[in-house]
Image: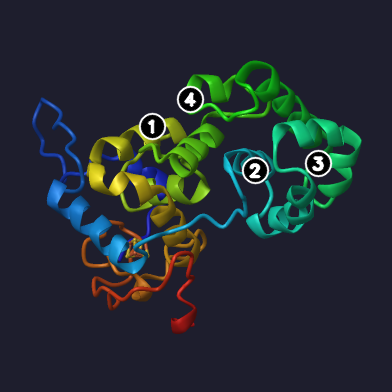
């Protein structure tokens, strides 16, 4: 089987070979709605209540953890935030702690100086403009220091249950590799996914895709024999069309039982 790069596959219309006609063929979605439904139904059976791996105790600590997680691992962030959140889990407490002290807690995380500055600045903004509460709308969130669209989408989804799609490296790769929502930018992949994912699955779709990308459809080499959607997947990179057994593996489980 050919193994073209995802980028070139994504750029191609997901239809059969172009015929020698003067008019170009119109691209159509690679997946039929019932196939998309089945993909997410299977993910929902695998992980009925998926959870992110960033530890937090409320919307504020979730926001801080996501801001700290840029270019850092969830495990590394959790190690730093456990003692930090034990002493400061509100914007007021974080402001009282001060930038220097926050920096001391997060020194093991990449770019910690700038992140400490942002954590204090966003805490001050929450106290000043929102009465110490985390706002539940995108515009207000992205106006906070250090908060971009992806961070806002994670907070809106996890803290407020909104059907947003925060496109991280795993979701971007899957959207393109399996042609579910091809796009050159995270925003294009986000728009494609929001358009095709059935509403009843939007709440958890973000985590399902991240966990699928982290543990199965991995960056360097997809682990297709362990994939529950191998029969549905339209990736030119897949190595089997036989789906793995569909069993529940837990909220954040990485298929440990099968390793
Ligand atoms: S079959 Fe392979 S390429 Fe397709 S989604 Fe599964 S792991 Fe990814």
Residue ID for mark 2: 61
**Comparing marks 3 and 1, which lies closer to the viewer?**
3
**Sequence-earlier tag: 2 or 3:** 2
Q: Nearer the viewer, residue 138 or 224?
A: 138
Task: Please state which of residues 184 and 189 is positioned toward the viewer in this rendering.
Answer: 189
Image location (x, y in percent) of residue 75: 67, 60
How is colour applied across the structure in the image?
A: rainbow
Residue 112 visible in the displayed image: yes
Provide the residue designation for mark 1. 188
Residue lying at 49% horizontally and 41% vertically, measured from the top left:
159
Query: Would you call the spot at circle 2 few (<14 residues within 10 Å), some (14-19), or many (20 or more)?
Result: many
Q: Residue at x 81, y 41 (%)?
A: 112
- Distance from Cα at disc 2 to Cα at disc 3: 16 Å
Marker disc for residue 2: none
Q: Quadrant of residue 117?
A: top right
CA separation, marks 4 and 2?
17 Å
Q: Earlier in the sequence, mark 3 or mark 4?
A: 3
Left or right position of 12 against 173: left
**Foreground tag (3 vs 4):** 4
- Can you identify the residue that label 3 sits on? 112
Sequence order check: which comes first, mark 1 or mark 4? Answer: 4
List the residue tagged with mark 4: 138
Tell me where residue 211 appears, x and y as whole percent. 46, 60
Residues at discs 3 and 1 in contact (Cβ within 8 Å): no
What element does badge 4 sit on?
helix
Q: Nearer the viewer, mark 4 or mark 2?
A: 2
Q: Between residues 161 and 253, which one lies in front from this camera angle?
A: 161
Q: CA distance from mark 3 to mark 4?
A: 25 Å
């Amino acid at each position: 089987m050919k193994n073209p790069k995802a980028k070139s596959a994504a750029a191609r219309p997901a239809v059969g070979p172009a015929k020698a006609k003067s008019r170009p063929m119109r691209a159509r979605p690679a997946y039929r709605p019932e196939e998309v439904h089945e993909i997410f139904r299977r993910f929902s059976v695998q992980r009925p209540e998926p959870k992110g791996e960033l530890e937090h105790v409320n919307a504020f600590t979730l926001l801080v953890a996501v801001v700290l997680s840029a270019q850092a691992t969830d495990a590394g962030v959790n190690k730093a935030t456990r003692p930090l959140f034990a002493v400061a889990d509100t914007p007021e407490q974080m402001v009282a702690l001060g930038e220097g002290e926050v920096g001391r807690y997060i020194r093991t995380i990449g770019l910690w100086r700038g992140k400490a500055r942002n954590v204090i600045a966003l805490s001050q903004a929450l106290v000043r403009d929102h009465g110490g509460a985390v706002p539940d709308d995108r515009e207000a969130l992205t106006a906070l220091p250090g908060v971009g669209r992806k961070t806002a989408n994670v907070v809106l989804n996890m803290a407020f249950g909104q059907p947003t799609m925060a496109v991280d490296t795993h979701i971007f790769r899957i959207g393109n590799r399996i042609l579910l929502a091809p796009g050159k930018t995270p925003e294009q992949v986000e728009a494609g996914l929001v358009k095709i994912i059935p509403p009843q699955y939007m709440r958890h779709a973000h985590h399902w895709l991240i966990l699928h990308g982290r543990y199965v459809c991995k960056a360097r080499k997809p682990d297709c024999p362990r994939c529950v959607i191998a029969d549905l997947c339209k990736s030119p990179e897949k190595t089997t069309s036989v789906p793995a057994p569909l069993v529940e593996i837990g909220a954040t489980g990485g298929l440990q039982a099968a390793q």
